[in-house]
Image (cartoon, grey):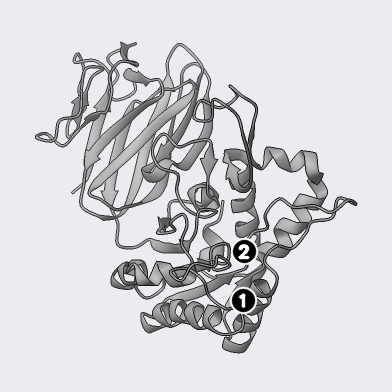
Amino acid sequence: MTWRYDFGTENELKEGYIKIGADALYHAEQGYGFGDISKVAGIRRSGEPLVGDFCIPFDSVFLTDVPDGNYIVRVCMGDELAPTVTTIRSNGERLMLRDVRTVAGQHTWQQFGVNVQGGQFRIRFEGIAPRINALEITPSSEQITLFLAGDSTVTDTELGGLPQSGWGQMLSYCFRHDVAIANHAKGGRSSKSFISEGRLDVIAEQIKEGDYLFIQFGHNDQKTDEERHTDPKTTYPEYLMKYVDTARSKNAIPVLITSVHRRRFDERGRQLDTHGEYLDAVRELAAAEGVALIDLAEKSKALFEELGPEGTKSVFLFGAPGEWINYSTGVQDNTHFQERGSLRIAELVAEGIRELNLLPLAIFLR
């Protein structure tokens, strides 16, 4: 089944599509609609099917109830009379399309892959002049699913949690529609607590041959509480090996990732290592077990030293009072990222995929 929606006014409807006007508020009984219609307008330019009318979904979310799984999503955007600029996010505030521009009279079809968990597909529209003419959501069993296991530096931000953002939330932007990101990372988790909470079991139930499992832990393994602490010489690599074994048991491909650095500099502006033996443990395990390794610690070190103590504030979650809506009193966070920072870290992960020539995953990078 493919869900097809024709946005705009009631005057014209493309056959096989459901008409979505500016007043189409989501109801569980019908299973689709806008979460809030206060900023949605319906416009008609002509009688041309699909492209002759549209909705302006300014900072709005459209919802569709669908079964869990992977989907290929196609969107049509444009306006016969005006230029448009549209950014699209999907489930978990994942960045899919960024500042897609059309000139007056131009319409563009774009597509991307989405992994849905929780029975609902959500698409958020942003941009200075957003448009949506049509939306198609098609189930797919052919996509590669890239599973992510990690902590708050990797996880999706909750709805309304921006600008804080994990790099896994931005990774979809680096791929074409052939890859769907299943981000199971969760803030505050270590390699140990992630497993004890059953999160690796969930991945094990879903991952299949040809999929990938990217594994990045370390920030919380350093914590001293019993629930999370692991020893870098013993229990840390032992727990990491459980992720590797899980992937391999399903003929999927595990990839170990060293922890991205925190924002710490010495007096000369050199990046300080706050993870120590945990980084060595990942590298040694990858070498001993023949597991692909993306050394994100080294990559982030090079980036942060290039940017310096001041420049890295644009990567991490820094903001003056009133700069961010969700941090009205200001914020100075040397561990977590703001959006442009998490996108930059996601690009480093994509760079690592290319360097390792992880096929076929690498050929689907944008």
Q: Residue 115: which disc?
A: none
Q: Please tell me which residue lies in front, 9 or 62.
A: 62
Decide if residue 233 is on the left or right side of residue 180: right
Report which quarter residue 277 is drawn in: bottom right
The residue at the far left in this view is 29
Residue 299 position, x and y percent, is 72, 60
- Disc 1 crowd, CA 10 A, few/some/many (<14, 14-19, 20+): many
Q: Is residue 153 left or right of residue 270?
A: left
Reply above or below: 55 against 335.
Answer: above
**In-front residue for pair 60/53:** 60
Cα distance in 3D space between marks 2 and 1: 9 Å
Q: Amino acid at mark 1?
A: Val
- Contact between marks 2 and 1 (CB within 8 A): the answer is yes
Nearer-N-terminus badge (2/1): 2
Q: Residue at x 36, y 80 (%)?
A: 250
Residue 208, given in percent of the width and then of the height, sits at: 34, 73
- Residue pictured at 27% horizontal, 19% vertical: 37
The crowd level at tag 2 (other Cα within 10 Å; few <14, some 14-19, many 20+) is many
Look at mark 2 in the image and give the residue it sits on: 259
Determine the residue positioned at 67% across, 54% down. 262
Q: Look at label 2 and name its amino acid.
A: Ser
Look at the picture and state if 234 lies above or below 98: below
Residue occupying the far front of the picture: 225
Specify the farthest residue to the right: 268
Which of the labelled discs sits on residue 282, or is there none?
1
The picture places residue 300, in percent across and down from the top left corner, at 71, 56
In terms of secondary structure, where does tag 2 sit? loop
Residue 23 sits in quarter = top left
Dot 1: element: helix
